[in-house]
């Protein structure tokens, strides 16, 4: 008669394509029961946004179907996001499993647009997501979400800021405080760092799978404070295809690497324009910016977002494309990039769970290996999902 060991042995042949480990040793099989050939268990995936979730489930069903003596399968599929950051010595953000900083070298490359639409895309997969607009000098998230200023509340009992709820996201922005245009202009180093620290640790974020932090451009006080205040999962770099943007992006990358902050990967925004008239793709800003950085630094290229007037109109009118036109090619590009970002978080989380240092050279070697595959195909990882 078939036994549990035999079932686990077969299930251990299923490898998570991102983590490169078998699903049994990764603890993804839960509550397994076997009764007279009737098999029941839960497959607990590492994130609802994994690009390979369907593939893993299919492989699991296939593995089980080959076991002699198993007559019936009752499979539940769930996802529990892994902790992609060390919570030791943390200053009160123990309920936030992953913190992702969205950075760039140059301004205006679309960080805020990317941060917001990625947050919405992750939230649509069922993950619990927060968005911190850390651009204290020029907060743009309120406008992009159509939220008026003055929404920031304080929970007097907990003595914490209460995030605003918007379209399923938990949002904090300096733009909610009012008169920020005048105030922010006169804020400098220590004050700015203090405000960001408060936004991070004095906010009642509740249980979050992902907290996306929209950073101002460059390598100033705010990105530096984020990198040095709390352990974060990693940085996502946004660039545009032009040489001038990508060469400045390299400087931001250099700073985070120096501070030993893991780099999750790079996203190319305003990548190509698909003409609605002739349906041809035009590389208005040239090509290959993210690809060059990806190969030079050995970091994964996680997606390409098209140049699209709908993306711009959505951001400017408070109706981001992920909400306004979820089935559009632009929204699908964000969805694909979001899945790749979540996959990178899971890879780092698995390293933490194994007691390894995520910023260690082996992590970079692994990232390099991952980045190399789509380059050979001449495509971003985003194209596979
Ligand atoms: N893929 C895109 N297609 C068309 N327009 C875009 C795209 N991405 C961003 N934009 C537009 O470009 C402008 C700049 O975008 P955004 O504010 O997101 O950039 P940013 O990098 O956050 O800027 P800053 O450095 O000032 O914070 C906005 O008007 C936005 O709507
Ligand atoms: Mg911005």
Image: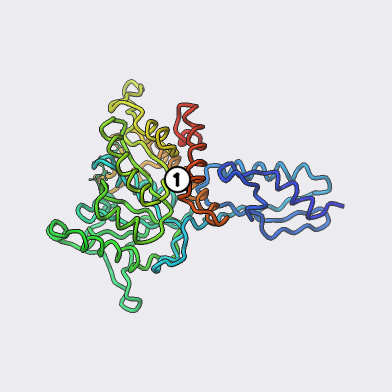
Q: Which of 232 and 43 is in front in this view?
A: 232
* Viewer-nearest residue: 366 or 41: 366
Q: Residue at x 48, y 51 (%)?
A: 358
The percent position of residue 219, horizontal first and vertical second, equals 27, 48
Residue at the bottom extreme? 157
Residue 149 rendering spot, x and y as whole percentages: 21, 60
Q: Name the residue under label 1.
A: 341
Q: In this view, does 338 lie to the left or right of 51?
A: left
Q: Is mark 1 within 8 Å of ligand 1?
A: no
In the image, 318: left or right of 117?
A: left
Whether 127 is drawn above or below 108: the answer is below
Q: By what rule are the colours in the image chosen? A: rainbow
Front residue of this view, candidates 187 and 380: 187
Secondary element under disc 1, as helix, strand or loop, is helix
Looking at the picture, does residue 38 appear above or below residue 94?
above
From this viewpoint, which residue is outermost toward the right? Answer: 1
Marks counted in the figure total 1
Q: Which residue is drawn at 39% across and 50% down?
A: 119
Q: Which of 13/119 is in front?
A: 13
Quarter assignment of residue 153? bottom left
- Image coordinates for residue 184, horizontal then vertical, percent: 16, 58
Assess disc 1: are there few (<14), some (14-19) or many (≥20) residues with their C-alpha within 10 Å of its C-alpha.
Answer: many
Residue depicted at x 37% and y 34%: 293
Residue 103, position as x, y percentages in the image: 32, 46
């Amino acid at each position: 008669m078939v036994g549990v060991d035999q079932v686990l042995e077969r299930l251990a042949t299923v490898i998570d394509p991102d983590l490169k480990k078998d699903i049994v040793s990764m603890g993804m099989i839960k509550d397994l029961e076997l009764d007279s050939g009737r098999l029941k268990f839960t497959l607990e995936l590492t994130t609802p946004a994994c690009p390979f979730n369907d593939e893993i489930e299919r492989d699991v069903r296939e593995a089980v179907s080959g076991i002699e003596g198993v007559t019936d399968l009752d499979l539940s599929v769930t996802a529990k996001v892994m902790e992609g950051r060390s919570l030791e010595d943390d200053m009160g953000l123990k309920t936030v499993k992953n913190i992702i900083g969205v950075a760039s070298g140059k301004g205006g490359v679309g960080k805020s647009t990317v941060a917001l639409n990625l947050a919405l895309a992750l939230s649509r997969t069922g993950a619990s997501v927060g968005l911190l607009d850390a651009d204290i000098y020029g907060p743009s998230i309120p406008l992009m979400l159509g939220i008026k200023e003055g929404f920031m509340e304080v929970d007097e009992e907990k003595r914490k800021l209460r995030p605003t709820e918007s379209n399923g996201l938990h949002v904090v922005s300096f733009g909610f405080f009012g008169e920020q245009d005048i105030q922010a202009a006169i804020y400098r180093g220590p004050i700015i760092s203090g405000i960001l620290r408060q936004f991070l640790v004095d906010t009642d974020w509740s249980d979050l799978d992902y907290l996306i932090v929209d950073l101002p451009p460059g390598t100033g006080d705010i990105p530096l404070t984020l990198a040095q205040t709390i352990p974060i999962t990693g940085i996502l770099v946004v660039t545009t295809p032009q040489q001038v943007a990508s060469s400045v992006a390299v400087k931001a990358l250099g700073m985070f690497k120096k501070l030993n902050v893991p780099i999750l990967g790079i996203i190319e925004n305003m990548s190509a324009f698909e003409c609605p008239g002739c349906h041809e793709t035009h590389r208005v800003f040239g090509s290959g910016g993210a690809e060059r950085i990806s190969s030079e630094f050995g970091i994964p290229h996680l997606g390409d977002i098209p140049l699209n007037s709908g993306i711009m109109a959505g951001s400017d009118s408070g109706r981001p494309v992920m909400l306004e036109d979820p089935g559009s090619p632009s929204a699908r590009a964000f969805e694909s990039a979001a899945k790749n970002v979540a996959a990178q978080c899971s890879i780092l989380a698995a390293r933490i769970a194994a007691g390894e240092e995520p910023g260690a050279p082996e992590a970079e070697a692994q990232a390099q290996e991952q980045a190399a595959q789509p380059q050979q195909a001449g495509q971003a990882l985003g194209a596979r999902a």
